Image (cartoon, helix red, strand yellow):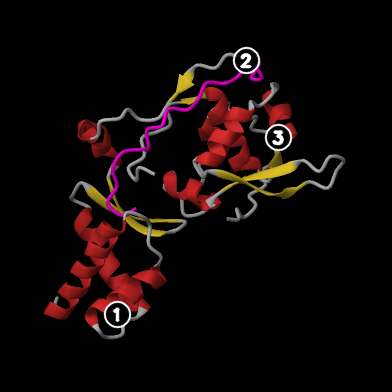
Amino acid sequence: MNDEALDIKHLLEAALLASGRPVEEGELIHLLESGLERSVGAEELEACLGTLASEYESRGLGLRRVASGLRIEIRPAYVRALHGLWDPKPARYSRALLETLAIMAYRQPVTRGEIEQIRGVSVAASILKTLEERGWTHIVGHREVPGRPALYATTRQFLDYFGLKSLADLPPLEQVGDLIPSELPLNFGEPRSGGFAGPAETDETETETETETETDAEATPEENPEGH
């Protein structure tokens, strides 16, 4: 590889490490062109990305494409060993919250009433608030029925957090466990709307209020190497 290609690769790696978030390919090309003061084509960018990905195969880092672009992240196998670097404890989520999120992901767009019908219990307002505050879900419209209930769907930030490029990358329903009945029809609607990563955010979720009529043991989502 010549010196120019090395410069491109190193600048690309530095951009991804410094960004602290996924970066779209168009933005990367702009950054490279600005730094190198010459044009950079999509094929050249892909070649450099391929080189980086190959080099990372034997290291503790990985290059991943998610919904918002590309990012360099810590490989999952190393995340737990590095938790000592970060003071706060990982966020923990109740089973009720995880069930609600799973239903939204696999059945979106979906109303609060439909979620409650599937779960068999009412959904606490605090759960919906937590999901929206984390940027994982949002309201995309209203169902045209009496009362016009809000329709909830997942966001691009949800995909980024769980390392997904699109809803098509969600695991098969049978791998999700018994969170939602497997016989339900799925609707993969398009949701509307980094860098070198640290730990998952650590804000503790509030406990369910009395409107949540079942007792749910706390559960922790799978460790996320990206950490958003």
Q: Nearer the viewer, residue 213 or 69?
A: 213
Bin the neighbour count of mark 1 within 10 Å (Cα to Cα): few under 14, some 14-19, many 20 and up.
some
Q: Which mark is residue 112?
A: 3
Helix, strand or loop under label 3: helix
**Residue at point 28% right, 79% down?**
34
Q: Nearer the viewer, residue 62 or 12?
A: 12
In the image, residue 29 above or below residue 65: below
Q: Which mark is residue 219?
A: none
Residue 172 can be seen in this image = no
Helix, strand or loop under label 1: helix
**Residue at point 27% right, 37% down?**
79
Residue 33 in picture, x, y percent from top left:
29, 80
In the image, residue 90 above or below residue 22: above
Q: Which residue is mark 1?
A: 33
Q: Earlier in the sequence, mark 3 or mark 2?
A: 3
Residue 146 in picture, x, y percent from top left:
87, 40
> Which quadrant of the view contains residue 227?
top left
Q: Nearer the viewer, residue 101 or 205?
A: 205
Q: Disc 1 versus disc 2: distance between alpha carbons?
A: 56 Å
Residue 102 in picture, x, y percent from top left:
57, 35
Q: Which mark is residue 214?
A: 2
Q: Which residues are magenta?
A: 194-214
